[in-house]
Image (spheres, rainbow, N blue to C red):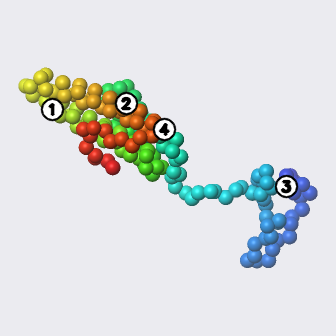
Amino acid sequence: MTTPHPENPQGHIPPQPPEGQLPPPSAQLPYPQTASGQGYPAPTQGYGPQVLDPAQQRQWGMFSHLIGVAAMVFSAGLLGFVSTLAVFLLYRERGDFVRRHAANSVNVQITMGVLTIVGIIFCLTVIGLVVGIPLIIAAWGWAFVVHILGAIKANNGEIWDPPLTPRFVK
């Protein structure tokens, strides 16, 4: 024995339309109704990344720098690049402002990584203690300060290119 469908409590089967024709809208099983009595509303925008409003773009531009600083500090520099790259890849198509700040954050991390590698190479030579360690400390300090300044600029809604940073990612 079958239980009646909630929308058809009597359990009778409506007549079927002729082959190749769609049933009239009243005979189709309705989708859940909204307050206006219609089915699900049509999406207002197409598929793909939705452009963020300006406040959200400022917020994610600031996060791109702050996440880089936090990951740099808590992972000894290893995850700073990965975190900023993740923000860049996830939000680059969601607005020009957030794309520029995320790209700047990635560029700062790349520059710091290159300077750190050069400092490590210097540390492996005879002049390592004189040049290598100060270079690594300077690179990390510079990246920390630049990320903090970038976060402040992004929160204020300002477009900003960090000083002494080549543009590897645009």
Give coordinates of residue 106: x percent, y percent: 34, 41
Asked whether 17 or 3 is in front, the reply is 17
Q: Nearer the viewer, mark 3 or mark 4?
A: 4
- Of the two numbered discs 2 and 1 on the same chain, state the one appearing first in sequence: 1
Q: Secondary structure at mark 2?
A: helix
Q: Is residue 106 above or below residue 123?
A: below
As drawn, the label of residue 148 is 2
> Which image quadrant is residue 20 in?
bottom right
Residue at x-position 63% and y-position 56%: 43
Residue at x-position 80% and y-position 55%: 37
Asked whether 76 or 111 is in front, the reply is 111
Q: For the residues marked 4 and 1, what is the alpha-carbon distance in whole angstroms?
A: 38 Å
Residue at x-position 32% and y-position 42%: 161
- Residue at image mark 4: 59
Q: For the residues marked 3 and 4, what is the alpha-carbon distance in whole angstroms?
A: 46 Å
- Of the two numbered discs 4 and 2 on the same chain, state the one appearing first in sequence: 4
Res. 13 visible in picture: yes
Q: Are marks 4 and 1 in contact (CB under 8 Å)?
A: no
Q: For the residues marked 2 and 1, what is the alpha-carbon distance in whole angstroms?
A: 28 Å
- Residue at image mark 3: 7
Q: Residues within 10 Å of mark 1 (few under 14, many from 20)?
A: few
Q: Are marks 2 and 3 in contact (CB under 8 Å)?
A: no
Q: Residues within 10 Å of mark 4 (few under 14, many from 20)?
A: some
Q: Secondary structure at mark 3?
A: loop
Quadrant where the image shows the N terminus = bottom right
Q: For the residues marked 4 and 2, what is the alpha-carbon distance in whole angstroms?
A: 14 Å
Q: For the residues marked 1 and 3, what is the alpha-carbon distance in whole angstroms?
A: 74 Å
Q: Residues within 10 Å of mark 3 (few under 14, many from 20)?
A: few
- Of the two numbered discs 3 and 4 on the same chain, state the one appearing first in sequence: 3
Residue lying at the far left in this picture: please name it: 126
